[in-house]
Amino acid sequence: MARRPGAPAAYGEDFSFVSPLVKYLLFFFNMLFWVISMVMVAVGVYARLMKHAEAALACLAVDPAILLIVVGVLMFLLTFCGCIGSLRENICLLQTFSLCLTIVFLLQLAAGVLGFVFSDKARGKVSEIISNAIVHYRDDLDLQNLIDFGQKKFGCCGGISYKDWSLNMYFNCSEDNPSRERCSVPYSCCLPTPNQAVINTMCGQGMQALDYLEASKVIYTNGCIDRLVNWIHSNLFVLGGVALGLAIPQLVGILLSMILVSQIKDQIKLQLYNQQHRADPWY
């Protein structure tokens, strides 16, 4: 039968605007991060149950275990929308996924810009966090290991200088301090000794009582804040690559979801057109 002049070209019954490649690529993309989110939640719950986080809460703005759980749950819900939306070709879920992912990307971008613009305030916040961590150095083993690792990695001691360790009650230089570590610094502040078989954990004994020149012969005297800033400046390309690596999956997810939504809408229009013109004798 002749087709009405001006009518769209007819498509077969099996034709679909929805590309299986886009659909299942988005599905497996979300499935991967869905699994990662469950691992994050499991690790966060395990960390929360296996240790008391009072010390971590005292020196950090947020308990790392709680932060891991919250981020994991949010990622789980977001990737769930992406998985089910792509598999069921649900426009509502796909648009929710795309919108939330766009908001997350913009928030990360804004945080990076604000951190760069207000670098002095960011530096002050880092200094406050390090000072609080020094105060609670002996209260939490994980925190202690983290500080020791940072000081050895960056070759530094304390926040601004090695004398910041007086903030800790065990290392405080006051006369009434009965601690055997009075006026000392942790062993991680000490300069490395070549071919040392056994670590001398008492190498920082009495170092706060010495001036910079004398102390620099045994320990690192520079603070970790300056070392951290210098490390960031010397590794800007690496940090930029990491930021790009985090941004690319988000942009890919946004792009794939938008393409799939557009294809689903075209498919719906095709189905409506076929239904309206199925009984048309000119169709």
Image (cartoon, rainbow, N blue to C red):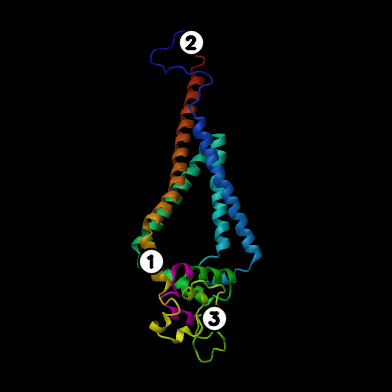
Q: State which quadrant residue 214 falls in.
A: bottom left
Could you tell me residue 31's position as x and y percent? 57, 43
Residue situated in front as seen by the camera: 105 or 271: 105
Residue tagged by mark 1?
Answer: 229
Q: Residue at x 48, y 82 (%)?
A: 166
Question: How packed is label 2: few (under 14 Cα within 10 Å), some, or many (20 or more)?
Answer: few
Amino acid marked by disc 2: Pro
Secondary structure at badge 1 equals helix
Q: Confirm whether residue 112 shows in the render.
A: yes
- Residue farthest left in this picture: 117
Q: Using the numbered discs, state the Cα–Cα distance from disc 3 to disc 2 in whole angstroms.
A: 96 Å
| Residue segment shown in magenta | 152-168
Residue tagged by mark 2?
Answer: 281
Query: Is residue 257 part of the magenta span, yes or no?
Result: no
Residue tagged by mark 3?
Answer: 202
* Relative horizontal placement of residue 32, taking residue 243 as reference (left or right): right
* Relative horizontal placement of residue 136, taking residue 216 as reference (left or right): right
Question: Which of the two discs, 3 and 1, sits closer to the camera?
Answer: 3
